[in-house]
């Protein structure tokens, strides 16, 4: 990517895969801003360490996203690269899941696709350039007990991506998905050890992904080198799901 022209917004960008993506884009020369909700000291420390502008808002709230994107663009300029990474999980077996847990995950993990992207897409279309990278999960296609809400949301992310890619292909905008497997993040650390051991037994590479490995995939899809890739889902899962 031209190092002196691209600007990027990474939602959920102060820790985990989002932070890795933000760092990778900055290393490629992009001017990067990140968002978070309730990141507290982690968000403050990330901003101080990286020098990136850090903004706090709820990506599940359409009006908050409108203001948040406006604040980002005032700080770094029109957004050329959007990484929709922010997400939550509220795991539980479906027959025990309450409506609040269902709606919380759909609101953030899927609703944010509309809420954030809607406020950058017109500018991208007018300028004739854009890179949108949405973060899904291997479990969108594979399924995982206890994650009906999460799997439904992430499958929706992939459908959203393919449709938007078709709409925007003639405007110089690519829209792609990265579907990570299990990575070494705080979200995965919450998985009980016995469950994690079972998961790793199914991973041919027999390890968790390093966040930087995902971040570098984001950087590639955001680059000029990936200009002929759109509507694609890039699996980065150590072979957990092939084909």
Image (cartoon, grey):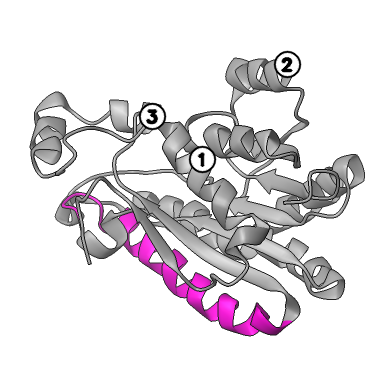
Task: Pinpoint residue 182: horizontal percent, then vertical percent.
Answer: 29, 40
**Picture coordinates of residue 60 (x, y %)?**
59, 52
Which residue is identified by label 1? 215
Give the residue displayed 58% in from the left and 19% down from the top: 42
Q: Which sits earlier in the primary sequence, circle 1 or circle 3?
A: 3
* CA distance separating discs 2 and 3: 21 Å
Q: Dominant secondary structure of the magenta stretch? A: helix
Which element is circle 2 on? helix
Element marked by disc 3: loop
**Residue 81, image x, y percentages:** 70, 54
Residue range (magenta) = 144-170
Mark 2 is surrounded, within 10 Å at the Cα level, by few (under 14), some (14 to 19) or many (20 or more) other residues, namely: few
Can residue 155 be found in the magenta stretch? yes
- Disc number at residue 48? 2
In the structure shown, which secondary structural element does the residue marked by tag 1 occupy?
A: helix
Circle on res. 185: 3
Residue 61 visible to the viewer: no
Mark 1: give few (<14), some (14-19) or many (20+) Cα within 10 Å: many
Q: Quadrant of residue 19?
A: top right
Please tell me which of labels 2 and 1 falls first in the chain: 2
């Amino acid at each position: 990517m031209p190092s002196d022209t691209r600007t990027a917004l990474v939602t959920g960008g102060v820790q985990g895969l989002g932070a890795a993506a933000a760092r990778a884009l900055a290393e490629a020369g992009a001017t990067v801003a990140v968002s978070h909700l309730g990141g507290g000291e982690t968000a403050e420390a990330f901003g101080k360490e990286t020098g990136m502008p850090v903004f706090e808002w709820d990506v599940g709230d359409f009006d908050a996203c409108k203001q948040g994107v406006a604040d980002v663009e005032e700080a770094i300029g029109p957004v050329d690269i959007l990484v929709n990474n922010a997400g939550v999980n509220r795991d539980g077996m479906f027959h025990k899941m309450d409506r609040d847990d269902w709606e919380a995950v759909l609101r953030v993990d899927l609703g944010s696709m509309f809420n954030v992207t809607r406020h950058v897409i017109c500018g991208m279309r007018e300028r004739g350039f854009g890179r949108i990278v949405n973060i899904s999960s291997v479990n969108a296609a594979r399924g995982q007990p206890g994650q009906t809400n999460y799997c439904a949301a992430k499958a929706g992310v992939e459908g959203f991506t393919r449709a938007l890619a078709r709409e925007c292909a003639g405007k110089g905008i690519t829209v792609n998905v990265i579907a990570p497997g299990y990575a070494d993040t705080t979200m995965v650390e919450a998985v009980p050890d016995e469950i994690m051991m079972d998961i790793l037994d199914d991973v041919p590479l027999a390890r968790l992904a390093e966040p930087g490995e995902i971040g570098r995939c984001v950087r590639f899809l955001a680059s000029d080198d990936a200009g002929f890739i759109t509507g694609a889902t890039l699996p980065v899962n150590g072979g957990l799901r092939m084909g």
